[in-house]
Amino acid sequence: MLAKTHIDALRKMLGAKGAITDPDLIAPHLNEWRGKFFGKTALMLAPANSTEAAKAIAYCNLHKIALVPQGGNTGLVGGGLPGLGMQQELLMSSKRMNSVLEVDSINYSITAEAGCTIATLQDAAADAGLLFPLSLASEGSCTVGGIVSTNAGGVHVLRYGNTRALTLGLEAVLPNGDIYDGLKKLRKDNSGYALDQLLIGAEGTLGFVSKATFKLFPAEIQKHTLWLSVNSPTDALSLLTSAREASGDRVSVFEIMPHAGLMFVLDHITGMRNPLSQTSPWYVLLEIAANRNDPALSDQTEVWLEAMLNCGLIKDGAIAMSASQAKDFWRLRESMSEAQKHVGGSIKHDISVPISALPDFITETTAALEARFNDCRVTPFGHLGDGNLHFNVMQPENTDREIFLAHWSEMNQLVHDLVVDYGGSISAEHGIGSLKKYELARTKPLAEITAMKAIKAALDPNNIMNPNVMFV
């Protein structure tokens, strides 16, 4: 139980808006959206700026009070919820630090506070005629601090890279309360350790990210959105290579989903339909984009599509003829996670392997799962273009949900062992959190774990920053 003296001190420091004890105000910040994790805390801190955050963190460090940073609370691995372990933890929300600070159209960069949503960043860039390319289903809720802390990816990694590749500089409050000012707009800086890179993907274990500067790009003026059917992931991979060559490497999206996944969407999400007249084992959402109007690209795309149909690499295909139709194609892909919630229990894996190995990985892992877990419905989907799949496994029909979910650890081990065999990662974009920390310890080489723990101990000797995640 947090002592009243600490609550009083933090309320005096941050004010009533910055130190919240009302359970009704705290409650929305304690539940993960898919219902797997439920946190608890006596106090939520919501500093208005970096200075307030630094004062609060310095106080907590002095008194060895643990803190869990949180952005938009859209995480999936229990990484942003306090009180999941035995330790008393406070929640530190960035929700009041939510401003876009600068759009530099000459430098092609944007700077914002940690609580600014990704949709707000996208809009601010668009208002300047530019593009912030990171895009994911939760972009209306997830925040700058959250995507930095999890090294988020999304659908445009193929062309623009993940958060790590997009980040130019960071400001963060370190565990001792010092403010690390690395908020630079430089493309080149070879003046020592890249400390901001340690904070990216650290899930709040090394500090509280307070501001970030990201790269911007010329806006995508012309887009061609295609919904295609293929026989196999092998054909999809060949299609990706062909599309990149034919478009002059202007493929910005390449997503894949199996027929079973599409049927979940059609059956459970209102207003959906298959754009194609025939069913297929696999479907691809492909987007080719240019930063200027290029009539030749339109012609080339149509010629390429016809060639792919003639050679049999594509079974069928449709090009969106309007923005509305393109949006309909996207809704099919973006509804995958929501549709699965209606189907029953699912055991999820956010994995990546080298792109060239994906077809073999899908084949071998699917066979292993079906042999071990009778009638399970393997439903891998996601970012084929960058090697990241959400390798979800749905409960068999007419099976008890809880009985199926009891296999979570066993199934994780099977899938993750194959991921390691293929030279992959057990977490591509969701993070480790508390959900995968035992699997991280089991699958990551000891030398890497030892080095990571040494960095954590050096920066956070009192272990106050998100102590329940990442490490066992």
Image (cartoon, helix red, strand yellow):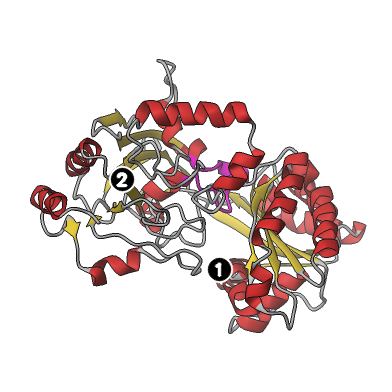
Q: Where is residue 248? Give x, y as percent.
A: 69, 41
Residue shown at 56%/41% (left/top)?
161
Mark 2: few/some/many CA within 10 Å (<14, 14-19, 20+): many
Is label 1 in contact with label 2 (beta carbons under 8 Å)?
Answer: no
Specify start and end residues of the magenta stretch as a single range.
Answer: 150-163
For label 2, the residue is: 66
* Amino acid type, mark 2: Ala
Task: Judge whether residue 162 is colored magenta.
Answer: yes
C-alpha distance separating marks 1 and 2: 48 Å
Query: Magenta includes 320?
Result: no
Specify the quadrant of the image occupied by residue 332. Answer: bottom right
Provide the secondary structure element on which disc 2 rests. Answer: strand
Q: Quadrant of the N terminus?
A: bottom left
Relative placement, left or right, of 268 versus 148 is right
Give me the residue at 42% from left, 20% from top: 189
Q: Earlier in the sequence, mark 1 or mark 2?
A: 2
In front of the other: 308 or 10 = 10
> Which residue is more in the foreground, 327 or 145?
145
- Apparent side of residue 228 relative to residue 38 in the rendered image (left or right): right
Q: Position of residue 163 (x, y in %)?
A: 49, 42
Residue 246 seen in the current view: no
Q: On the image, which quarter does residue 71 sit in?
A: bottom left
Residue that sits furthest to the right in the current view? 311
Return the residue at label 1.
323
In this rendering, position of residue 329 left or right of residue 74? right
